[in-house]
Image (cartoon, rainbow, N blue to C red):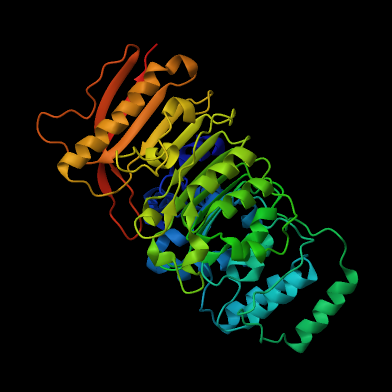
Amino acid sequence: MESLPDEIWRDIFANFEGDLPYEKWWMYGVEVDLSPVKTLMSISRVCKRFHRIAEPLLYRTILVAAHDNDNEECLVQLTKSLVSNPQLGHDIRTITLGNGCRQGDDDFREALRSTWLSLGAPISFKRQLGKEIADHRVVGMAPLILALSPQVRLVDYTFDNTSPCTMWILSGRPDLEMSLKEDYYDDTELAEEDEEALKEYELKQGETYAHYGLPHLEEVRIRHGDCTDSHIPMDELEPVLLHPNLKTLRLLGIGWLSNPISNFKFPNEPCNLETLELKECLFDHSTLENILTRCKRLKWLCMETADARRHDLYVDEEDWDLDLSKVGDVLRRLGHNLEYFNLHTIEYDNWGFFDGRLGSLRDLKALRHLKVILNNLTGRVRNPWETDLEQEIPLAEALSPMIETLHLHWDEEYYSHVEYKRFCDNINGAVFRLLMAADGFPNLRKISIERHGGKRQKGESEWDKSVDGWEVEVTEKHLWQRYSSSGCMRTLIYLTKTR
């Protein structure tokens, strides 16, 4: 062992560093593989030298929320480590956190208090955090951990009536006014000695606040604390939109409708996001308008509707009527910088009021990657008796001329075998006609079609057409897994350009 330099051992140990992948980020940590981290922890206990080498790697990726039942205890242990040795927080690059901890003895709170008093943060943040540390219900650990992690790049967070201090620090704006929502408790009083310490601090504080802007933060993922029911109004998360360096935001179980938009406190503040993902969220055309108006640099946008379980008493049904024609109008007016757009409406279509079609997106010259239900884009194939229904638009007239990839989601409606065959034939025909016009789309290289698995009868083909320069692959894939659902099998047809 002594013959190998520390650098070699570090490279070896780095193979066991924790990882928080993008795939299935919405699964509340159950898909996170903790075995490498456990191996690294075992290595760190071998000898003092190994502990010294491995410790920074252990703190680079903190997977607290992935410990499930041990979440609260892990949060306590992490906080104790950072409080006793704040330098460890400088190693943190990725962290996944639960909402806070409702335990902690007097000695632990005293240790938190000591660290809180030493923070060089704005007075409003220090006062609110001090109250939460003094309160026996919530001890303010999540924002304190973030305050001690100045180099963090990715924050993965499960939100449930969270501390306003957490959203404040995720804003990256030390100058931002601390605000409390109406139903947030604020009846805890600071001890007299703490009030005196704050007053003394306020007299001495300057205009800069160490690292509390989290200047290296690039991505934030926020999930509603309830994995199936209700939602978080977006105005409670608004501060995170203000972070000047944040590039990617992924949200699960959020309501971004007109009422939360009207409650925004900083509606004119710029947002520098380039990637935004809304999963199981409540949104409509006003949401899209707000996003595209505010996020001028946005290039990648994914929007997936929530189902009825996330619709609660605070949202009137008529306030959430999804009109795709209005969504299309907003896209054509404001979506000219989008390079990727994914709209998935199945969950809402199954229970809500749903109307219209997006219509042609030909004018979106930057759009290179599109995922959508065919009928949502072009309109449904009109039956002879449906004289009041608009004729569907050919795919070749609906797509950006710069399109590179197209994915057609399954529309989830129930079909008898005869109806299913006709439905599939309609989609195949639309895609075939697009391929016949492919000269108008020089960058088009891949088309994928998602279908319900196992619906075809023996001898029937998912794709029975031949197109020069395109190869066909039909496969089965397990999709749409959620924390509360095992997902389902889907048939996928891939058409790939070969020359």
Task: Compare residues 422 and 408 and report the one nearer the observer.
Answer: 422
Q: To which quarter of the image does residue 95 belong? A: bottom right
Q: Residue at x 46, y 61 (%)?
A: 65
Extreme residue toward the right, this view: 203
Task: Compare residues 135 and 328 and report the one nearer the observer.
Answer: 328
**Where is residue 178 drawn, in percent x and y?**
73, 69
Q: Residue at x 27, y 39 (%)?
A: 451
Q: Is residue 364 above or below residue 260?
A: above
Task: Compare residues 196 and 495 and report the one nearer the observer.
Answer: 495
Extreme residue toward the left, this view: 458
Q: Is residue 395 left or right of residue 59?
A: left
**Where is residue 133 drawn, in percent x and y?**
63, 78
Q: Residue at x 26, y 16 (%)?
A: 466
Where, quadrant-wise, is the C terminus in this rendering? Answer: top left
Q: Is residue 227 above or below residue 450?
A: below
**Where is residue 309 drawn, in percent x and y?**
39, 66
Q: Is residue 118 left or right of residue 393?
A: right
Q: To which quarter of the image does residue 306 belong? A: bottom left
Q: Is residue 101 visible?
A: yes
Task: Compare residues 77 and 131 and report the one nearer the observer.
Answer: 131
**Where is residue 276 drawn, in percent x and y?**
56, 47
Q: Is residue 442 visible?
A: no
Q: Residue at x 47, y 70 (%)?
A: 72
Number of labelled discs? Answer: 0
